[in-house]
Image (cartoon, helix red, strand yellow):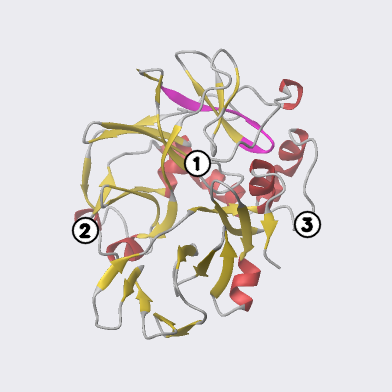
Amino acid sequence: MMNTVNHFDAARAVLRDYLEGYPARLTVSAQQPLSDALSNEQIGADSRLLTFEYNGVLYTIPMSVVLSYNVVQGSIGGQEWLMTFCNACNTGMVFDPLVGGQIRHFQRRGSYDGLLLIWDEESGSFWQHITGQCLYGPSQGEQLRQITVTRQMTAAEVLAQAAPAQMLISTLTPEQEQLSRMMEKMRDKPERAEGGILETIAVEDTRRPRFELGLGVWTENESHFFPLVLLHAQDSAYLAQVDGRTLLIYHQPEAIAPVAAYVDARRAWWEREVLRLDGGRYIQDDLLYTVDGRTQSLERPMQLLMRWYGFALTFPGCRVAM
């Protein structure tokens, strides 16, 4: 991960839970096949989920739950994991919560640069929720290991994937359900919390509208932001050069979020739900099909669907596709 935050100004940080009185972390241990949750009508085909892939399995959790807690922790096959989500910047990551050989227990706790801060109970330190950098407290300078990125998908999108899918089991109280609806309104229109967001920002990058959504992509050497409006103007298939390689950014019909993958291609165009590449290959349901019909997994850089202000403040000086 590129080093992004070199100085932390506690004077403009919010170092308390902005949803005080509500649980600030969910610990999950049970799961079930997503298909079972669908057949049991626990969710619908259009239900929005936050997902991450680990060891070839897609793990999912309803967005209504994510918006209520913002921090989820669990263990999969002996691997401890920590998932974050910021309602304002509209994204989150998955980390290993092991620090110095000790499992840390994190929770939602305040904001900085308009982004969620997470806090660990063991050291009382504050961490950036996308980079995993410890910004303030006894663990300052430590770095959480990234496991993977999150992706927003519907249940129907997930089930169309080749990977098996599991849903992490959780429930909300009536009060949390009401909170989740409130947070969904704020996530949809972050202008509702604009004053509080701006109070924690020192210098803002004004090259794009503050709350514009786009796909943020980064490597060890570069970071790029691809606005959704640009992608849609290019028929939802856009080729760019990132770190000396050709990157295809595409938005499948009915998908919530665009995705990016490295390809060896000069052209890409849609034929209904099939994304054709010159040379006879094509992409469907996030798999690359070769000329002879074999399937291959797509290689992807780190990427998140994110609002402009959050990506620009996390990756200062990032490149912007115009």
| Label annotation for residue 85 | 1
> Residue 108 in magenta?
yes
The residue pinned by badge 2 equals 35
Instruction: Look at the image and give the residue range highlighted in magenta.
Output: 105-115
**Which residue does the image show at 61% across and 36% down from the upper left?**
3
Contact between marks 1 and 3 (CB within 8 A): the answer is no
Specify which label sits upstream in the sequence, 2 or 3: 2
The residue pinned by badge 3 equals 207
**Which residue does the image show at 38% across and 64% down from the upper left?**
46
Disc 2 crowd rating (10 Å Cα; few below 14, some 14-19, many 20+) is some
Dot 2: element: helix
Contact between marks 2 and 3 (CB within 8 A): the answer is no
Q: Amino acid at mark 3?
A: Arg
Specify which label sits upstream in the sequence, 1 or 3: 1
Q: Main secondary structure of the magenta part?
A: strand
Q: How far is mark 2 from mark 1, CA to CA?
A: 24 Å
Which residue is farthest front? 244
Q: How far is mark 1 from mark 3, CA to CA?
A: 25 Å
Residue 100, x across and y down, in percent: 41, 17
Which circle, 2 or 1, is nearer the viewer? 1
Q: Quadrant of residue 25?
A: top left
Quadrant the C terminus occupies: bottom right
Q: How far is mark 2 from mark 3, CA to CA?
A: 43 Å
> Residue 44 in magenta?
no
Q: Is residue 270 left or right of residue 311?
A: left
Q: Amino acid at mark 2?
A: Ser
Q: Is residue 302 above or below residue 281?
A: above
Disc 1 crowd rating (10 Å Cα; few below 14, some 14-19, many 20+) is many
**Which residue does the image show at 69% across and 54% down from the upper left?**
211
